Image: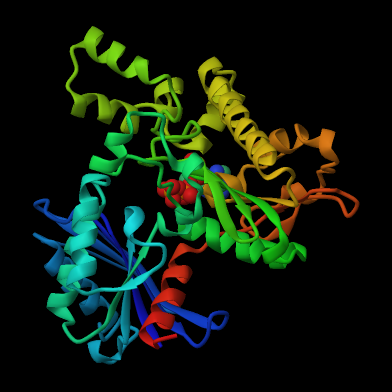
Amino acid sequence: MIILVINCGSSSIKYQLLDMKSDEVYDLLAKGLVEKVGLPMGCITHKPTGKDKMYKELSIPDHKIGMQIVLDALVDPEYGVLKSFDDIEAIGHRVVQGADFFSGSAIVNEDVISKIEICCDYAPLHNPAHLLGIRACQHVLPSVPQVVTFDTAYHQTMPDYAYMYALPYEYYEKYRVRRYGAHGTSHQFVADKGAKFVGLDLNNSKIITCHIGNGSSISAIVNGKVVDTSMGFTPLEGMIMGTRCGNIDPNVVTYIMKKENLTPDEMTTIMNKKSGFLGVSGVSSDARDIDTAANEGNYRAKLVFKKLSYDIIKIIGSYIAVMDGVDAIFFTAGIGENNVRLRRRVCENFSYMGLKFDYEANVAQGVDTLLSCPDSKVKVALITTDEELVIARDTMHLVLGE
Ligand code: ADP
């Protein structure tokens, strides 16, 4: 089944075209990125498998035209991978926020769309863009079934005491204010693949998945079901991230707002876009730049790295307590898959419970690798993530009625 996977942002459209033969057997036909939608001049970078990359600058006033440009690239005589649009059998969309409406992926219909619309309140930067993408696809490929996969769905198994904030209960009832988590597709994929990789039965396991990238979250998963995750009502909660502050005393927010005379929107921007690695180091939001600066002796860059490993250790430690033990810890995403020093620093703190870290194996980057010694009581592994594949699999199953 040929499936187009779409991840629509407010000014971008990321896409992958996959030929899914089964869950495990598939070909990536092409991937690409449309950027600067709505700006005076936009661009598309299209990478067809086995052919040259295509880059074009052109006017992309809205998402409908953006989608049309993606389709044109897919059937382009020189750079295309399809004969006709009709070859696309289904479309799968990533949606950031499904709140407690969705505990799994869903076929798009007007009811699903209206629930995603309600969730715009909780993900104002993301959900409206996803809706634009869904509508654009309905416009350009009206007869092709569409599926939505939610970043929040996998976390819907969290118990009430884990997702509830200790605020007046009426805010939960009136505004659905509670913890939802994020990166669910990645945590699910990594827990499933990682369990197989280290020889655990997922249905009889205690796993901690660490998705450490530009945005970062950690999940505690018992028998394949999430019992806690570090992101909350929005992806701001949890550890220090590229530009997000993670956990802070909520009173700090109103204190700084009063001192600096800031509006709620301005404060939200500071916490989401100007904090984290960027805010503390003053150097960059990118971990590689932080590493370089730290190696040159920059105190604030070193502090970022120390805080990142400290936050991760604290969350993992609390999840081991919550689960009454752990069988495996998996690292994934840009930093988790590549930052050798961070993985070492984190894992060294769990030697007390019999985790024996394999320092030689830990040179690995971006390839599934066992990072614990054979006699380690806790297995540790680098497991690469693939959120698009989860979306393509779910799309295939739902469209086939499975
Ligand atoms: P996003 O949340 O945007 O998907 P990623 O998972 O791609 O983020 O992670 C981005 C982070 O991963 C950046 O901080 C980057 O420095 C880091 N990263 C990516 N590739 C590497 C690499 N090869 N070596 C070290 N760090 C990397």
**Looking at the image, which is closer to me, 397 or 39?**
397
Residue 78 lies in what quarter of the image?
bottom left
Count numbered badges in the picture: 0
Image coordinates for residue 134, horizontal then vertical, percent: 21, 68
Residue at left offset 54%, top offset 61%: 188
Residue 114 lies in what quarter of the image?
bottom left
Image coordinates for residue 375, horizontal then vertical, percent: 91, 51
In the displayed structure, would residue 95 be above or below residue 376? below
Image coordinates for residue 345, horizontal then vertical, percent: 71, 33
**Looking at the image, which is closer to me, 193 or 223?**
223
**Looking at the image, which is closer to me, 355 or 11?**
355
For the C terminus, the image quarter is bottom left
For the N terminus, the image quarter is bottom left
In the displayed structure, would residue 303 be above or below residue 154? above
In the displayed structure, would residue 165 be above or below residue 388? above
Image coordinates for residue 171, horizontal then vertical, percent: 28, 35
